[in-house]
Amino acid sequence: MFRNDIGIDLGTATTLIYVAGKGIVLKEPSIVAMDARTNKKMAVGQAAYEMLGKTSDLIRVVRPLAEGVISDYEVTEEMLKDFFKKVCSNKFFKPRVCVCVPSAITEVESRAVIDTVMSSGARNVFLIEEPVAAAIGAGIDITVPGGIAILDIGGGTSDIAILSLNGIVCKTSLKVAGNTFNQAIIKYIRSTYNVLIGDNTADRIKRDIATVWPEDASPDEYEVKGRNLVTGLPQRISITNQELMEPLAAEVEHIILALQSVLERTPPELVADIEQSGLIMTGGGSMLGGMDKLISSRIRIQARLADNPVEAVAIGTGLSFDYLGKLYDGFVTYTNYSTK
Ligand SMILES: Nc1ncnc2c1ncn2[C@@H]1O[C@H](COP(=O)(O)OP(=O)(O)OP(=O)(O)O)[C@@H](O)[C@H]1O
Ligand SMILES: [Mg+2]
């Protein structure tokens, strides 16, 4: 890995950048605020996040990624240009960039990532699938023969993969992840209390109290502020994590079913290895309270959170340059479009 190599986890919720020799140098929300009249960018990352839900019609606050892929190319390019400027100390040499992508990305979507990253100022672009990056970032030796099970739950997608000997044996990707959990909380509070809460509030509830493991649930009350849908006025309500458990567990069930279907397709020898080594969970979404316990009890394989679940994918993406020559075809997609 050279000094000018950078790894990017271009996430639906957060973008992280790993620079060789320095580690994670940037971690900002994947958000851009644009002037609605001129279409010029006004703020990027954390500064734009703070504007979310608080702007007039003259400012458009955009999340340019949805469900793990780019949904607004121009805005993503603007965001990346800004981030590159912040992290690239050498203004003369363009960086080699490795970007992680969901396993189920289509040809067209990956082309869009390559083109966008190239026009944001990269010299070469490589793509790596998220669960592979997650495994490398979690410090797992992916070169050994023996099953490694990875579950990366991000904001927009959950990626599941069984790895062995530098290759993906089985994989799947589903669009149920952290954002889905927020939506489930919003929907529950709206239908039960007739109160509308914003996405940031739902996210806070999820991080502060939510659990999907019955033994961790408690009757302790948590105050939430929202708007009453009938009166239109602000209203405070008290909720408990007990009542949120069912709607959240219903969403986690989709992830469990996907895990079960991947395990069913996995060769028996590898399943035996995985029973020994367990399932490694990465991504911010996997930090939902009790998720590891619920998954362990359902699939009968010990699930555990990686040491650094939020940063594992970005770290692995940065470190993947070390594997460029060693990996089998289809592991790191070689997308080496050089600029002239
Ligand atoms: N402590 C926590 N408890 C529960 N959820 C959390 C916690 N911390 C972060 N999250 C959730 O993690 C999600 C973001 O995770 P992450 O940063 O891994 O996603 P991403 O990589 O941007 O998305 P994707 O991989 O889908 O493109 C958000 O939904 C956020 O609410
Ligand atoms: Mg991610």
Image (cartoon, rainbow, N blue to C red):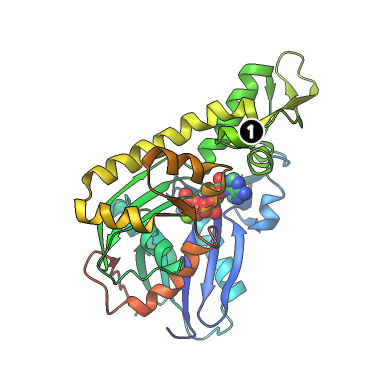
The residue identified by callout 1 is 217
Q: Quadrant of the N terminus?
A: bottom left
Q: Is residue 119 above or below residue 88?
A: above
Corner quadrant of residue 232: top right
Which kind of residue does numbered mark 1 sit on? Ala
- Quarter of the image for residue 334 reads bottom left
Locate residue 328 relative to residue 8 in the image: left or right: left
Q: Is residue 328 left or right of residue 117?
A: left
Q: Is residue 39 left or right of residue 94?
A: right
The residue under the point 37% across, 41% down is 299
The quarter in which the C terminus is drawn is bottom left
The front one of 13 and 192 is 192
- Secondary element under disc 1, as helix, strand or loop, is loop
| Residue 228 percent location from the top left of the image | 74, 19
Going by the image, does 115 lie left or right of 333?
right
Residue under the point 49% across and 49% down:
154
